[in-house]
Image (cartoon, rainbow, N blue to C red):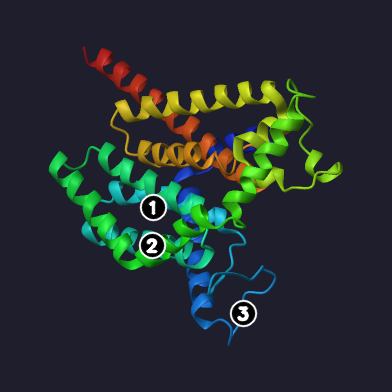
Amino acid sequence: MLFILYFPTKKFYRINQKRAFSLLFTLLGVGYAGLNLIQYFLYPKVIFLQGINYAFRGDSVRFYSGFYITVTVIFFLIYYFFNAKNKLLKILCTIALFCNMMYLMEVTLIRNATFSVLFAIFIIILLQKEYKYIWKLTLVLAAASIFFFVFGANLNTLLQSALEDSTGTGAFRVTLYKYVFSNLIYSPIFGYGFISPYSINVPYNIHVDTGFVGFIYEFGLMGLIWAIILLLKFIKLTIKLYKNNNKKSYLYISYILYTIVIALFNCPFNTKELIVYFVIIYSLLENDVKDMENEYKLKNINSYSSI
C-alpha cells in the first residue's frame, strides 16, 4: 500500500500546487477537530456525528474516529505559525493549534498520541531559529503552563490510568509483547505477513497496539531494516532543509519526532490511516528538498551569468 500511494502522490505534488494542497489539508483537519469539539459539548443531548464509536474512559465520553488527520495537521500548523508574516496569522495558527490539541486531549483521550505530540512541540520550539534562546525557553514554559493549567487534571488521570491500572491498556500491551516475542521466533526473517492478525487466529489486536513490535511480528527483521532505512532517509532530507534555514523543516522535524516516540504504540507502516499520512508527508518532503536544490542551482547559474 505504501508504494501504491507513494508514486502517484509524488507525481501529484509536482504537477499541482503543493501550497494549496497543504492549506486545504490543514483546513480539513482543523475543521474536523472543531466539529468533534462541538459534538463533545453537545453530547448526549444532541448527536450529529453519526457512524463514529462513542466510548468512555473514566467519567468522560471519548470518540476518536479519524483523529489521525488532526494529529498530522498539528505539525502543519507548527510550520504555518513560524512561517507567518504577521501577528494575525500567528494568532489564527495558535487558535487552530489549540483547537486541535483540545480535541486530542479532551475528546480522544489518547495518551500515547497526546504525550508524543507535546514532546514534538516542545522540542521544535527549542530547535526553531526564529527566536533567541531566552525566548525559546519562554515559549516552552508558556506553552507547558497553558497546557498543564487547562488540561492538567486530564493529563494526570491519563497518566495514572496508564501506569497504575492493572486492567488497562498498559498491562494489556505487556501481554501483547509477550505473545509477539514468544511467537516471533518461528518466523523472524519475514514475519507472519501484513494481514496475519486478520487471517489467522491471533487473540490480540497486534496490528494496532504494539507499534514497531507488531510491525516486526508482521514483516520480520527484513521489514524492520527497510523501515529503519526509510526513516533515516526521512531524517537526512529533513536535516538538509533545516541546515538551509527552510522553515518547512519544522513540519518534518515535529512529525518525525512524533513518529519515533509513538512508534512504541503505533507504527506508521502497518496501519492504513498512518500509511496514508506518512506518504503525504514524505512526498511533500522530497518535493520540498528538490525545489530547494533547484532554487540553489538557479541562483548559482544567475550568479555565474552576471559574472
Earlier-in-chain disc, 1 versus 3: 3
Q: Which residue is mark 1?
A: 77
Pick whichever, 162 or 211, lies toward us. Answer: 162
Calculate the distance from the C-alpha at mark 2 to the C-alpha at mark 1.
7 Å
Q: Which mark is residue 17?
A: none
Contact (Cβ within 8 Å) of mark 2 with mark 1: yes
SS for dot 3: loop
Earlier-in-chain disc, 2 versus 3: 3
Q: Residue at (79%, 31%) from the top-left corner?
A: 192
The image shows residue 242 at horizontal and vertical percentages of: 33, 30
Q: Which residue is mark 3?
A: 48
Calculate the distance from the C-alpha at mark 2 to the C-alpha at mark 3.
22 Å
Q: Which mark is residue 96?
A: 2
SS for dot 1: helix
Category of crowding for the residue at label 2, using alpha-carbon neighbours closer than 10 angstroms: few (below 14), some (14–19), many (at least 20): many
Pick whichever, 62 or 17, lies toward us. Answer: 62
As shown in the figure, which amino acid type bears the numbered disc 2? Ala
The image shows residue 256 at horizontal and vertical percentages of: 46, 37
Image quadrant containing the C terminus: top left
The image shows residue 13 at horizontal and vertical percentages of: 54, 39
Q: Residue at (66%, 68%) from the top-left corner?
A: 52
The image shows residue 100 at horizontal and vertical percentages of: 44, 61
